[in-house]
Image (cartoon, rainbow, N blue to C red):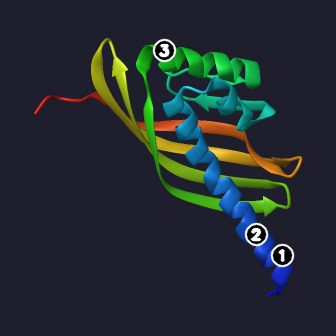
Amino acid sequence: MATQTTEAALQGVIDREAIRNLPLQYCHCVWQQDTVAYANLFTEDGSFGTDDPSLPKAQGRDALRTMIGGQMATSKPRPFIHNHVVELTGPDTAKGTCYVEVRLQRDGAPWLMSGYYHDQYAKVGGEWKFKSRQITVDSFAPVKAA
């Protein structure tokens, strides 16, 4: 088993903490309706994708700004991130999974979506960004009144 220097171990901790902050900032930008900051969490060619045909897809910061702006206006999403697992795959690359619950509006009624993001990260100019973000939806249903 190869031993890691203290400096390399510390850099790994710093990198994982910066990466774990990305989904938190992602949620914050959505809640604050800050489309510019949202898009800047991604690399220039970063992408958001899904297999769910009812959800939007986008690649590149301009398309990401447009996509999230449209979602903010129509569905008012309120995402909550949980259980973020990060794997450093190189000095400037990583991948991770985090689980999500999104409260939103659909046709004026409250809905709840749950699932997970599979993310690819890249360090650009010393800063970690989303290279790609792929959401898998586990459930998507209206919230019933109690």
* Residue at mark 2: 12
Q: Give how far across and how far down residue 56 sits, in percent.
A: 56, 20
Left or right side of 26 for 127 = right
User: Which residue appears farthest toward the left when viewing the image?
Assistant: 146
* Residue at mark 1: 8
Whether pointer 1 and pointer 2 mark residues with C-beta atoms closer than 8 Å, the reply is yes
Residue in the picture at 56% in, 47% down: 24
- What amino acid type should be assigned to the residue bearing mark 3? Ala
Q: Secondary structure at mark 2?
A: helix
* Residue at mark 3: 73
Could you give the CA–CA distance between mark 1 and mark 2, rounded to whole angstroms? 6 Å
On-image quarter of the C terminus? top left
- What amino acid type should be assigned to the residue bearing mark 1? Ala
Q: Give how far across and how far down residue 139 sits, in percent.
A: 36, 36
Could you give the CA–CA distance between mark 2 and mark 3, rounded to whole angstroms? 38 Å
In the rendered image, the vertical position of residue 135 relative to residue 127, given as above or below: above
On-image quarter of the N terminus? bottom right
Residue 41: quadrant of the picture? top right
Could you give the CA–CA distance between mark 1 and mark 3, rounded to whole angstroms? 44 Å
